[in-house]
Image (cartoon, helix red, strand yellow):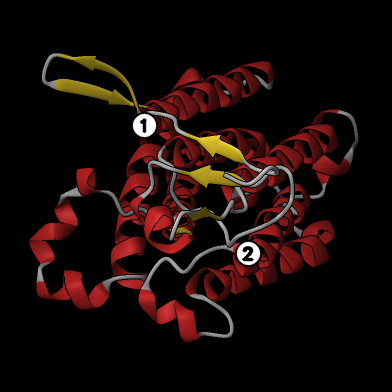
Amino acid sequence: MTLASIVWDVDPVLVHLGSVSIRWYGLMWGLGFILAFEMVSRLFKKEGYPDEWADKLFIYCIVSTVLGARLGHCLFYEWDYYGAHPLEILKIWHGGLASHGGVFAIILALVWYSRKVTHKSVWWLFDRMIPAVAVVCMGIRFGNLMNSEIFGFPTTLPWGFEFVRSREWQELYNQNGVAQACHPTQIYEMLYCLAALIVSWVMYHKTRLAKKIGLITGVSLIIFFGSRFGLEFMKNPQVAEEASMTFNIGQWLSVPLILLGGYLIATSGKRKENL
């Protein structure tokens, strides 16, 4: 251990109940969605919309996020393997979720939801959902931290982490008795999610900017994925192919969402609330 580092030796399993284990990662996914549902449900109720809107939205979000994140990982990161072993795609408990896949899927699902349920612009809906989305993302990144996964390159900064429970960290950064602390990029990602949460909440509740449909969503997309694009330069490759890439897969997938954010900001003054 170096002087300027933190030894991260946290059990990813919160509690063992016989043969069943409750892991931090799954708990944070579930807790994030529960908090998100409560936030959106209260907002809809405050604005006088039917209770069933939030109930249906919860189902759309759960199904699309999980399916999209799983398929995104399989398609974008490890298609050579999953294409040859398609039944492995169903084994979600083995791990492998990609946030970009979840985002693309939830946009498509909520376009359908908006047409069938609210009859309003999908960006009207996202403007109200962004703080809740940020809470879910924070929970997922906290789960990544508890799993000692998706961390960054070595650093000499005093908040560098030694992820001693990670096989990847042991193989790459704990050789010949020399331990190298790494960037806790999970925490960095939690911080930009917190920034998106605060900015979107203030824009919606403390200003009149919510009248510009899509503005809050556009600003938040740039916070989320502009930050993600930059942080990818600090992170270890998720698959071997990324080691030789100038921009990795996560960065390329962030580009259309950054551009979408810019488009939503530029056109927010022209967009109508209703379909």
The residue wearing badge 2 is 234
Residue type marked 1: Pro
Q: Residues within 10 Å of mark 1 (few under 14, many from 20)?
A: some
Image point (60%, 60%), residue name: 154
Residue 112 position, x and y percent, is 42, 51
Percent coordinates x, y for residue 71 in the rendering: 30, 60
Q: Nearer the viewer, residue 160 or 184?
A: 160
Specify the quadrant that holds the N terminus.
top right
Q: Give the CA separation, mark 1 to mark 2.
A: 23 Å
Nearer-the-camera pick, 204 or 89? 89
Q: Is residue 275 visible?
A: no
Disc number for residue 90: none
Q: Earlier in the sequence, mark 1 or mark 2?
A: 1
Label 2: how many Cα within 10 Å (few below 14, some 14–19, many 20+): some
* Residue that badge 1 annotates: 12
Outermost residue toward the top in this view: 17
Percent of width and height locating residue 216: 76, 47
Mark 2, secondary structure of its residue: helix
Q: Amino acid at mark 2?
A: Met
Q: Quadrant of residue 172?
A: bottom left
What's the residue at 68%, 22% (across, down)? 47
Residue at 42%, 44% in the rendered image: 116
Give residue 72's position: percent from left, percent from top.
36, 63
Looking at the picture, tell me which residue is in the foreground, 193 or 207. 193
